[in-house]
Image (tube, grey):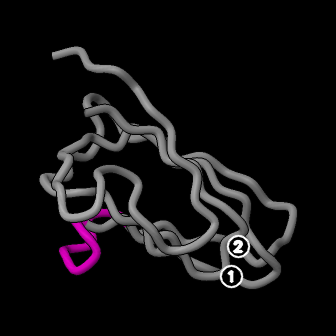
Amino acid sequence: MQSDVHTTRVSADGYITGTSGKAQPARVKAVYYVASGSAGTIALKNGSGGSTLVTIDTPASATATDQVWFPENGIRFSDRVYCDVTNVSFVTVVWAG
């Protein structure tokens, strides 16, 4: 099944997909990030209070960048995709839905 691919960039905790109170299932295809001066994490959750489906550890380097690609159709989120960031400058999530 083909669908449009989107990107959403966040620099703090927040929703990647969906609007207030409305679920928007999606498949996360990739994550790109710029780390900060301290080691950190990126957690992608099935809604803000839902299960964490992906956790990415980031290095302690203000100039480090990396990208993580998920094979095949990506990781399926049945609710809105929520990004919880700790010590990360910004995150761009590539998703379809």
| Residue 8, image x, y percentages | 51, 46
Q: Which of 92 and 20 is in front in this view?
A: 20
Q: Give the range drawn in magenta.
A: 46-54
- Which quadrant holds residue 84? bottom left
Instruction: Please determine whether, in this image, residue 41 is positioned above or below residue 56.
Output: below
**Which numbered tag is attached to residue 59?**
2
Question: Mark 1 — residue?
Answer: 39
In the image, taking residue 89 as reference, residue 41 lies left or right, namely left
Q: Position of residue 63 (x, y in %)?
A: 87, 62
Image coords of residue 57 (percent x, y):
55, 72
| Mark found first going from the N terminus, 2 or 1 | 1
Residue nearest the observer in this picture, 87 or 19: 19
Assign a secondary structure to mark 2. Answer: loop
Q: Are marks 2 and 1 in contact (CB under 8 Å)?
A: yes
Q: Tell me what residue is drawn at x 75 percent, y 84 percent.
A: 38
In the drawing, does residue 29 fall left or right of residue 52? right
Distance of label 2 from label 1 (alpha carbons):
5 Å
**Camera-side residue of 50 and 68:** 50
The C terminus lies in which quarter of the figure? top left
Q: Which residue is drawn at 46% across and 39% down?
A: 94
Name the residue located 77 percent from the left edge and 74 percent from the top edge. 36
40 over 47 or under it: above or below: below
Residue at x 67% of width, y 72% of height: 88
Q: Does the magenta stretch include residue 29?
A: no
Element at badge 1? loop
